[in-house]
Image (cartoon, coloured by chain):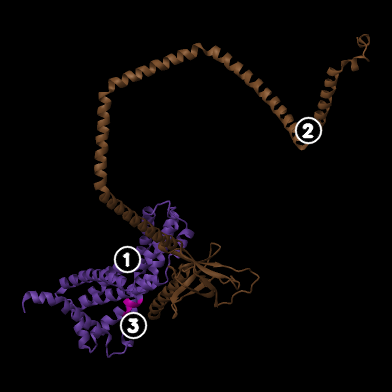
Chain colours: A brown, B purple
């Protein structure tokens, strides 16, 4: 009986220890009875990663982080427990995923092609520090806020400058505005005073335009006929002008030829020989006629009137 | 010394008396083998015999927490696994040690105070002293040892049964599946949590047994005094558990 009491106590304690150890392994998502495939890695920043965080390959849980510690060189050392049947090829790398603000961080392993030799148990896998999505958004929002602040500051400066400008020129603007108002008032006054005259003028203008309208209505046919004739005349004139242009062109050609000394007419004009010959011929003819007057019988003796007619 | 000064200094007097009692209990000239039988008896009574009531309380705590968290965290933005993420750490960090502590403060604390108080008022303690035994070591050391050894065991049982109760109710009530519950518990699990819970259990075990021993050992005033000591043992154990719970959370987390 004495032993049984001690045995029961011992069994209770042993059972509690087993449950405790297995419970931790279970909640860490580490296989309860099998050994695990252990890998080490380093990150620049843990980014909210802690012991117990899951490890995923293509979104599937394959193990858990055992611990996250700071090295002597201030890099983050992480020990990973993976399922024993996994073989991570050389050249694979690990990243931290998830949103640290929600505490749901995990390690993502990007495996290299399966042809590479596997990393040995307890080996090193390269850790790549990717920026946390939430941190990236926060970082951008900080920049955005800075930009907005800068823009607001500029807007403030602009408004201040505008205020100053208005303040400085205010003295000039006010009299101008006053003068403008006076002019407007005077114009309004004049318009009021001359309202009757303006009305009469507008009335006259209306009458004149009415007359014009009537006039144009009555003479429409005649005007159209006249215009038609004018059109015809214009057409004729155009053809005449074309003919005239042709004639002028021909005349130009003739004159050019004359100037160049081509043709009979040109020679007639340019060559003095004919003139000289004609002069001598006329002189001869004159002396002949003189001779005829002086001595008609000499020529008429051989002329028979009957033969002539 | 005026009455008010005595009243002011009273807590310090009690603290000193309590510290000396614990000190004398463990600094004993006697061999431990003298107390071995007594220690195992106490481990049996404090630890093993408390398992059913602790298991019952833990199972219901886990079940109720699961139902209430399901009720509170109904949202399209939260996956069902979040219930497991809340219930498991709650059991490990808080409910496991504190519920166990309260139950044992009533069950074990009252029992120890009543035993020692009766021995005091019936002059059995004086008889032990007359026999040449160190009554403090003989009566108190086994009880405190049994407390600090068995209480962590009860804590582990409470956590396991509590989470089990949560999973059972989650399945039976259709709140979430076992896989979802476990997935949620694993996602947000931190290995430090159970060690923190275990340290709480260790401290609570010491508080319950030592406070109850103090109350019982210094009982005065006959049967009425025994009743008073018993009540005070249970009440003061609970109060010190709450204080220690806060102090540990602030210092260790």
Q: CA distance from mark 1 to mark 3?
A: 29 Å
The residue shown at (56%, 62%) is A58
In the displayed orientation, state which residue is furthest to the front: A294
Do the residues at discs 1 and 3 belong to one chain? Answer: yes
Q: Which residue is mark 1?
A: B99
Where is residue B193, by image quadrant?
bottom left
In the image, which residues are magenta? B145-149
Q: Farthest residue toward the left?
A: B2
Above or below residue B248? Residue A167 is: above
Distance CA(mark 2)–CA(mark 1) = 144 Å
Regarding residue A75, the answer to whether it shows in the image is yes
Q: Which mark is residue B37?
A: 3
Q: Horizontal and vertical percent for residue A125?
A: 55, 74
Q: Nearer the viewer, residue A142 or A29?
A: A142
Q: Nearer the viewer, mark 2 or mark 3?
A: 2
- Give whichever of discs 1 and 3 has the lower sequence position: 3
**Tag 2 and tag 1 share a subunit:** no
Quadrant of res A71: bottom left
């Amino acid at each position: 009986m004495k032993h049984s009491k001690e045995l029961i106590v011992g069994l209770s304690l042993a059972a509690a220890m087993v449950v405790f150890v297995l419970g931790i392994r279970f909640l860490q998502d580490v296989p309860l009875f099998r050994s695990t495939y252990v890998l080490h890695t380093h990150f620049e920043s843990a980014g909210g990663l802690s012991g117990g965080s899951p490890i995923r390959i293509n979104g599937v849980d394959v193990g858990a982080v055992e611990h996250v510690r700071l090295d002597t060189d201030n890099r983050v050392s992480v020990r990973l427990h993976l399922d024993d049947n996994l073989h991570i090829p050389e050249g694979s790398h690990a990243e931290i995923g998830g949103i640290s603000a929600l505490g749901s961080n995990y390690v993502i392993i990007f495996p290299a092609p399966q042809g590479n030799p596997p990393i040995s148990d307890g080996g090193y896998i390269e850790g790549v520090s990717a920026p946390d999505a939430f941190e990236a958004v926060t970082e951008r929002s900080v920049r955005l806020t800075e930009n907005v602040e800068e823009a607001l500051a500029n807007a403030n400066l602009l408004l201040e400058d505008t205020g100053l400008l208005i303040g400085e020129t205010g003295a000039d603007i006010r009299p101008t505005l006053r003068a403008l108002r006076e002019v407007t008032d005077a114009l309004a006054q004049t318009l009021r005073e001359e309202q009757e005259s303006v009305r009469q003028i507008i009335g006259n203008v209306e009458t004149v335009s009415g007359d014009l309208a009537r006039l144009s209505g009555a003479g429409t046919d005649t005007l159209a006929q006249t215009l038609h004739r004018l059109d015809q005349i214009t057409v004729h004139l155009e053809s005449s002008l074309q003919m005239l242009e042709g004639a002028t062109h021909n005349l130009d050609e003739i004159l050019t030829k004359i100037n160049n000394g081509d043709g009979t007419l040109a020679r007639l004009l340019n060559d003095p020989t004919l003139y000289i010959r004609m002069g001598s011929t006329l002189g001869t003819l004159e002396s002949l006629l003189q001779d005829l007057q002086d001595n008609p019988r000499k020529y008429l003796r051989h002329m028979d009137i009957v033969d002539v007619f | 010394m005026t009455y008010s000064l005595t009243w002011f200094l009273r807590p310090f007097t009690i603290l000193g008396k309590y510290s000396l009692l614990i000190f004398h209990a463990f600094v004993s000239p006697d061999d431990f083998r003298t107390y071995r039988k007594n220690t195992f008896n106490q481990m049996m009574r404090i630890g093993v015999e408390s398992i059913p009531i602790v298991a019952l309380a833990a199972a219901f705590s886990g079940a109720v927490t699961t139902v209430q968290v399901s009720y509170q965290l109904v949202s399209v933005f939260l996956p069902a696994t979040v219930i497991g993420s809340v219930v498991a750490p709650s059991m490990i960090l808080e409910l496991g040690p504190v519920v166990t502590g309260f139950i044992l403060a009533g069950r074990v604390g009252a029992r120890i105070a009543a035993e020692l108080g009766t021995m005091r008022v019936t002059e059995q303690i004086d008889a032990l002293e007359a026999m040449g035994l160190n009554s403090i070591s003989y009566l108190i050391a086994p009880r405190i040892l049994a407390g600090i050894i068995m209480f962590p065991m009860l804590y582990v049982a409470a956590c396991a049964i509590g989470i089990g109760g949560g999973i059972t109710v989650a399945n039976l009530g259709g709140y979430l599946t076992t896989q979802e519950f476990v997935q949620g518990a694993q996602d947000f699990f931190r290995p430090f949590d159970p060690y923190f819970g275990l340290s709480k259990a260790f401290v609570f075990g010491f508080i319950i047994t030592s406070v109850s021993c103090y109350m019982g050992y210094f009982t005065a005033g006959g049967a009425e005094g025994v009743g008073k000591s018993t009540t005070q043992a249970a009440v003061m154990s609970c109060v010190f558990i709450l204080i220690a719970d806060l102090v540990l959370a602030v210092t260790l987390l």
